[in-house]
Amino acid sequence: MIKIRMRSSCNRKEQAYYGIRTIIRSDPMNQHQPLSERSELSGRYTDNGTTVLVEIFRRSGGDDWRMEVTSLEDQLTDWNEPFASAHEAWDEFIYVVNTEGIAVFL
């Protein structure tokens, strides 16, 4: 199931780096251990002139992957259920784009 919500706000440094926000955050007690791991499948995706930011991530040491898709207008779409792998999440994203169109994320 997909859940759509508007993002509240993010700091300017995060906006500058990813265009919207970053998922990986470091634990202040251990600067070498990120709190979450970002998949290499994450990034900008453009179809028919529309661009969205796809973030696929999991908690550091966790098994379940999460996915969020953010439009350039800052509308956030995320899934209620986790994915078994980053590739499964990516496949779901592509399926939605192919069946419903990228406009579903706007």
Image (cartoon, helix red, strand yellow):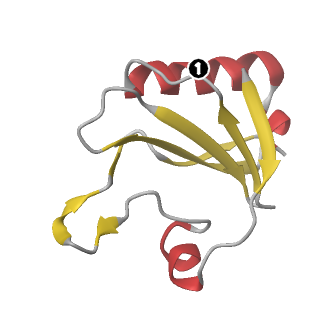
Amino acid type at image mark 1: Glu
Q: Nearer the viewer, residue 88 or 43?
A: 88
Q: Nearer the viewer, residue 82 or 16?
A: 82
Residue 104 vertical placement versus 106 (above, below): above
Task: Please provide percent x and percent y for residue 28.
Answer: 27, 75
Left/right of residue 40 with respect to residue 53 in the rendered view: left
Residue highlighted by disc 1: 92
| Circle 1 Cα neighbour tier, 10 Å, few/some/many (<14 / 14–19 / ≥20) | some
Image quarter of residue 21? bottom right
Task: Please provide percent x and percent y for residue 40.
Answer: 34, 43
Task: Please provide percent x and percent y for residue 79.
Answer: 65, 30
Left/right of residue 86 with respect to residue 61 in the rendered view: right
State which quarter of the image contains the N terminus. Answer: top right
Residue 67 vertical placement versus 63 (above, below): below
Left/right of residue 28 with respect to residue 51 in the rendered view: left
Identified at 59% across, 80% down, the residue is: 11
Identified at 37% across, 22% down, the residue is: 85
Disc 1 on helix, strand or loop? helix
Identified at 80% across, 27% down, the residue is: 101
Task: Please provide percent x and percent y for residue 35.
Answer: 32, 55
> As drawn, which residue projects farthest toward the bottom?
12
